[in-house]
Amino acid sequence: MNYYIDLKANKDGKHLIHSDNCIDSCPSHKKIGRSKKLGEHKNGNKAIAVASKEYPDWAFADTLSFCEFEGKKVAQSNDLATRYIWSIISMVVIPIIAVILILPNDNSESNRKEELTPIGQYKKNCFSSWDGRHHNLVKMVKDGLLDSSSFKHIESKYSDDYSSYMRYSATSRLGLTVIKEITVQSDLGCNILEIIKEN
C-alpha cells in the first residue's frame, strides 16, 4: 500500500502519515493539502520509520492516526451501503424475476395448444416459419418451371381442410416475369394430393 506524509504539521505539531485508503477522506489532509509520497510499505509503522529517517526533526502521529481511523470508518460505511443496496436488489428484483418465470405466458400456451391440433401440426411441418411457403408445393412448382431459379414466392395461405394457396412469380417461355397462383389439396404429411386451381 502507498503511504504519504503531510508536508505541514497539524495543529498538534505532528505530521500525519496517510495510506491510499484514507488520503482522500481525511479532513486534516484536506486542510493542509500538500503531501509527499513515501512509497509502498507493508504498514503504517514501516512508513513512519522511513519518514523518521527522511525528516528526523519532525514529530509524527502514531499509526492509527485520525486519518486512518476515519478512512476505516468511510470504508466500513461504503461497505454497509453496498450491502444495503444488494439486499434491496435481492428483495425486489429476484422476486420479480421469479414471478416472470413462474407465471405462464399466455402467448406460448396458445401456441403450444395450436401445435397440438392437427392444423397446428400441418402448419408447423409443412410451412416455412420464415416466409410461410409450403415446402412441397414450392418444390412441385419449381420442378415444372423452365427456369427454376426465376421462382419468387409472394404469399401462401392454408385452410383447415389442408388445402394450400400460393402466389408466386416466375419467368415465362417468352422471357417475361409473370405472377401465377396455385391452390392444391395436401395431407397432414405435406404431400400434394391434387391441384385444385391454377392461374
Image (tube, helix red, strand yellow):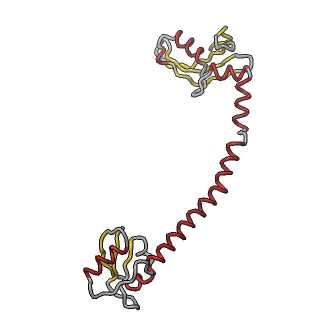
Residue 177 image offset from top left, x and y in percent: 50, 19
Residue closer to the observer: 65 or 30: 65
Residue closer to the observer: 128 or 177: 128
Task: Name the residue at 30% across, 71% down.
Answer: 39
* Relative to 130, residue 96 above or below: below
Picture quadrant of residue 83: bottom right
* Relative to 198, residue 130 above or below: below
Quarter of the rendering occupied by the C terminus: top right
Task: Name the residue at 67% across, 43% down.
Answer: 101
Q: Is residue 42 left or right of residue 88?
A: left
Task: Name the residue at 61% across, 19% down.
Answer: 134
* Relative to 156, residue 191 above or below: above
Quarter of the rendering occupied by the N terminus: bottom left
Q: Is residue 126 left or right of residue 33?
A: right
Residue 174 image offset from top left, x and y in percent: 47, 13
Picture quadrant of residue 57: bottom left
Total numbered labels:
0
* Relative to 152, residue 19 above or below: below
Residue closer to the observer: 19 or 190: 19
Residue 129 image offset from top left, x and y in percent: 60, 27
Q: Is residue 53 left or right of residue 18?
A: left
Picture quadrant of residue 53: bottom left
Residue 165 image offset from top left, x and y in percent: 65, 19
